[in-house]
Amino acid sequence: MSASLTESDWNFRILDKRLVVVKTKNESTHKVAVLDMLTNLMFTAQVRQTISIEQLTENQQYLFNLNVYSSKNIEGVERDFVSFFEAIDIDQSMEDFIKAYWVYPTKIRFELVEVEEP
């Protein structure tokens, strides 16, 4: 796992399997930008070092198992959204986290832990 995700300033939220299309990949940072097929929204995922990013093909569909983390630092989060980040014992959907990523991209992290071809 990336060092940035192991620090104590992140809360693990959920593990979910998503059908995505890899749009771009950056081998030097070990990240991929993907389009979620259900929400039709893009987000970036950190790829675990145990996964070969070179084997991922752009514009191809995959089933990604993703860990989702939210920042413990909620500075800058509007009051109406504070409970979303603070209530870690409430089940929230993957769609909620993808949408929150668009509003607060520095407060949500996705980590690719396993890849399957659909």
Image (cartoon, rainbow, N blue to C red):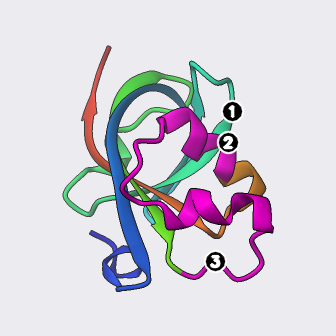
- Give the camera-side residue of 104 and 50: 104
**Picture quadrant where residue 57 is located:** top left
The answer to whether any part of residue 115 appears in the image is yes
Q: Say if mark 2 contacts mark 1, CB within 8 Å.
A: yes
Under tag 2, what secondary structure?
helix
Judged left or right of residue 21, residue 106 is: right
Question: What residue range appears in magenta?
Answer: 73-100
On whether residue 81 falls in the magenta region, the answer is yes
Asked if residue 92 lies in the magenta stretch, the reply is yes
The quarter of the displayed image where residue 115 is located? top left
Q: Is residue 79 left or right of residue 41?
A: right
Which residue is identified by label 2? 99
| Circle 1 residues within 10 Å: few <14, some 14–19, many ≥20 | some
Q: Nearer the viewer, residue 48 or 52?
A: 48
- Of mark 2 and mark 3, the one earlier in the sequence is 3
- Up the image or down, 24 lies above or below 110; here it is above
In space, the residues marked 1 and 3 are separated at their CA atoms by: 23 Å
Q: Give the CA separation, mark 2 to mark 3.
A: 16 Å
Q: Residue furthest left?
A: 50
Q: Which residue occupies 26% across, 63% down? A: 49
Q: Quadrant of the C terminus?
A: top left
Please give the residue where the numbered disc 1 appears in the rendered image: 41
- Depth check: 85 or 15 in front? 85
Name the residue located 39 percent from the left edge and 37 percent from the top edge: 56
Disc sitting over residue 74 in the figure: 3
Answer whether labels 2 and 3 touch (C-beta < 8 Å).
no
The N terminus: image quadrant: bottom left
Q: Is residue 60 left or right of residue 103?
A: left
Helix, strand or loop under label 1: loop
Q: Check disc 2 and give the amino acid type.
A: Lys
Residue 109 position within the rendered picture, expressed as x and y whole percent measured from the top left: 50, 61
User: The disc labelled 3 sits on which kind of residue?
Assistant: Ile
